[in-house]
Image (cartoon, grey):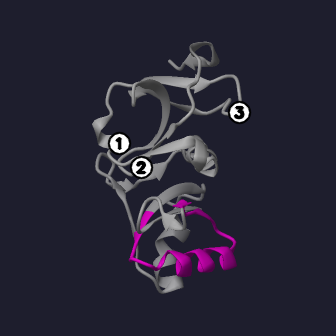
Amino acid sequence: MKQSIAQWYVAKVRYRTEKKIKNYLEKEGIEHYIPFRDEKPVIPCTVFIRTDYERALSLPEECGCTIDYLYNPDTKKFRIIPGKQLTDFMFLQEFSDKTILLTHPEDLSGGEKVRVIKGEFAGIEGELYRIKGHRRVVVRLEGLASLALGNYIAKECLERII
């Protein structure tokens, strides 16, 4: 079965090969994302690649680098990051001075799903948690990384997602 729809795949790469892979993907016109903070990768040895399944399979050989895609343990297929989730994460990463990088996101559980409806972060969807004594909206890339809004967001600026 051939999948021709472009999806966001998560790839693990060898240490310090992110730039080489980035250059190759740029040359090929393949959309990708490698989050950096203070010139260091936020998620070490990880590259997000938006392409179709067939091209994802051929990339490791084409670029001559080790690219191992993460698998979804339930489906036994390549793990796909929803576009909206990654877009929100990328948007928050641009405001790194206003976000908190959570180093142990697995400690968070039971957050209420919310959408910011007012202010500079309007449209961001995440989960509501109490962090450092304040309610924060957290955008989570499950099992990889999480960013929390550093700013307090008033209750009236949030709506619950059902």
For label 1, the residue is 105
**What is the secondary structure assignment of the residue under circle 1?**
helix
Which of label 2 and label 3 is nearer to you?
3
Hey, which quadrant is residue 31 in on the image? bottom right
What label does residue 120 carry, if any?
A: 3
Picture coordinates of residue 27, whole percent (x, y): 68, 79
Q: Amino acid at mark 1?
A: Pro
Residue shown at 56% from the left, 14% from the top: 155
Picture coordinates of residue 99, whole percent (x, y): 54, 42
**What is the secondary structure assignment of the residue under circle 2?**
strand
**What is the secondary structure assignment of the residue under circle 3?**
loop
Residue 12 relative to residue 139: left or right: left
Q: Dots 2 and 3: beta carbons under 8 Å?
A: no
Residue shown at 58% from the left, 49% from the top: 96
Q: Which residues are magenta?
A: 11-37
* Neighbours of disc 1 within 10 Å: few (<14), some (14-19), many (20+): some
For label 2, the residue is 145
From this view, report whether residue 155 is shown above or below residue 134: above
Q: Amino acid at mark 2?
A: Ala
Q: Dots 1 and 2: beta carbons under 8 Å?
A: yes
For this orientation, the residue located farthest to the top is: 156
